[in-house]
Amino acid sequence: MNGVGMANVRRAWAMIAALVVVAPMALAGCGEGEKPRFVNATGQPTTSPTPPAEPVVLAITPATGAAKQPVSTEIGTTVTGGKITDVTLTTGGTKVPGSLREDGTSWVPDGPLKYAKQYEATVTATGPSGQVETKTTSFTTMAKPRSQIGSGLYLFDDKVYGVAMPVVVEFSPGIPKKDRAAVQRRMFVRTDPPQPGAWHWVANGTQAFYRAPKFWQPETKLTVRIGLEGIPLSNGKYGNVDRKASTRIGDSFEMKVDNSTKQMTVFENGKLVRTMPVSLGKRATPSSSGTMVVMEKKETTVFDTRDDPNPANRYVTDIDFAQRLTWGGEFIHAAPWSVEQQGRTNVSHGCVNLSTPNARWLFERTKIGDPVTVKGTERRLENGNGWTAWDMSWDEFVKGSALPVSTAPAATGSAPASPSAGVTPSS
C-alpha cells in the first residue's frame, strides 16, 4: 500500500473513532434520554415507583344497634384520606332531609327525629383519587321524655325588625353552664348578606343573645333554627321543641337620650330627624344608662305597681304609646303630667317621659329591635335586664359564648315566650 492509501485508511479510522465518541453525546440530548433511569436487580430499566393512594378511613355514629337515642341525634362523621360526599338517613323507607355541618363533623337533620322510631344511615366518603368508603348504621330513638325545659324564640316569621334586634332565646329553667356548649351547637343562624356573629349567655342561663359585631345591615335577612327538641341536659331535662323563624331587618332608626341635656335625638338612616325634651327617672328611681332595644309596643296599657315593696312607688295609671326597654319596667311613653319638667328635671320612676305628641310621633315610626341609648344617669343597665346584647363591646360580648367564636360570616330555628314573671312597669 502506498503512502496515499495509508493516509486514507488513517483518516477513515479517525472518522469512525469520532463517531463512537459523538453518538452517545447526541443520544443524551434527545427524548430517548428522558426514559426512566431506574433498574431492577438484573440491571434492566424499570418505571418510577408510584406511591399508593392514601386509604379512606371512615367512622360514623351512632353505633349500629344503639337504642334510646335522643331525637336531636346527628350522624357523626370522622374521615381521613377523603371527605364526606353523601349521607342518607331513612326511617320506614322515608328519606330524612338534612345537611352536613361546615366543619364536616356531623350531618344534621333539618328537624327533630321522631320518637321511638328506627333509623338507618348510609355515609360515603371519597378520596382525591376516587377511592370510596361507605359505612352504614342503624339505631332507634327514645320515647318522648316527661321532663322538659321551656324555651322561647323572640322572632316571628315575615316580620321587620330594627337594626339592633338580637336573636333572643329564653330558657326556663336556665341552662346549666356545663350544657351550654351542646345547646349552642344546636342554635343556627344564617344572615344574608353574610355577617359574622356570636352567641352570649346571660349569667343564669335563662337567656342567650346572638348579634353581629355592629348593628345589622339594613335589609339583612335572618334565618334562625333553635333545634332544641330532645337535647339531653345534665339536670335530667330535655329540650322541648324546635323553633324556626325567617325575618328581615328594616331601615336604621336610632334613639339617643342624654341626661345632661334632658333631650332625645332621633336618627333615621344616620340622619338627625328630630330632637325632643324628656324627663327621666328621679334620683330615688333612676333610669338605666346603657344601650337597650325596643322590646314591646303598646298603644294603650295600664301601669299597675301596687305590689312594689316601696309604698311611694305604688300607683295605677293609664299609659299611651308605651315602648318597653327592660324587663324591670322601664319604658318610653307619653307622660302629659310631666310636660313642664321635660327638658328640665327628672321626675319619673325610671321611664323616659315624652309629651303626647312626641310620644305618638315616635311610636308611629319605631320597630321592635330599634336601639335606644341612655347615658349619664345614676344607674348602669344590668346585663339580662331586657335584650342587653348591645350594651357591651364585641370583645366583652364574645366572652359569653360557650364555644370558640369564629370571625367568619354565619351559617344556620317559632313563637315568642312570655316575659319573665314578676315584671312591673314604672313611669
Image (cartoon, rainbow, N blue to C red):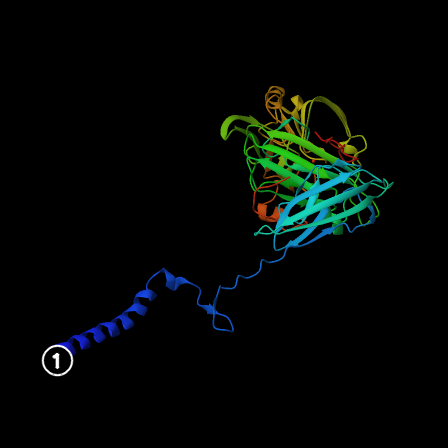
Left/right of residue 342 with respect to residue 19 in the rendered view:
right
Badge 1: few (under 14), some or many (20 or more) residues near its Cα, within 10 Å? Answer: few
Query: Where residue 282 sits: x, y (%)?
Result: 66, 34
Residue 383 shows in the view: no
What secondary structure is found at the residue carrying circle 1?
loop
Dot 1 corresponds to which residue?
2
Residue 363 shows in the view: yes
Quadrant (top left/top right/bottom left/bottom right) for the C terminus: top right
Left/right of residue 194 with respect to residue 58 in the rendered view:
left
Picture layout, residue 103 above or below residue 221: below
Quadrant (top left/top right/bottom left/bottom right) for the N terminus: bottom left
Query: Where residue 345 sits: x, y (%)?
Result: 61, 31
Q: Residue furthest front?
A: 1
Depth check: give the residue in front, 384 or 92. Answer: 92
Left/right of residue 17 with respect to residue 36 in the rendered view:
left
Depth check: give the residue in front, 346 or 175. Answer: 175
Query: Where residue 202 sits: x, y (%)?
Result: 70, 45
Picture layout, residue 148 above or below residue 368: below
Q: Name which residue lies at 56% across and 45% down.
A: 408
Query: Where residue 281 sits: x, y (%)?
Result: 66, 34
Kind of residue at badge 1: Asn
**Image-quadrant location for residue 141:** top right
Depth check: give the residue in front, 313 or 116. Answer: 116
Left/right of residue 34 with respect to residue 245 in the rendered view:
left
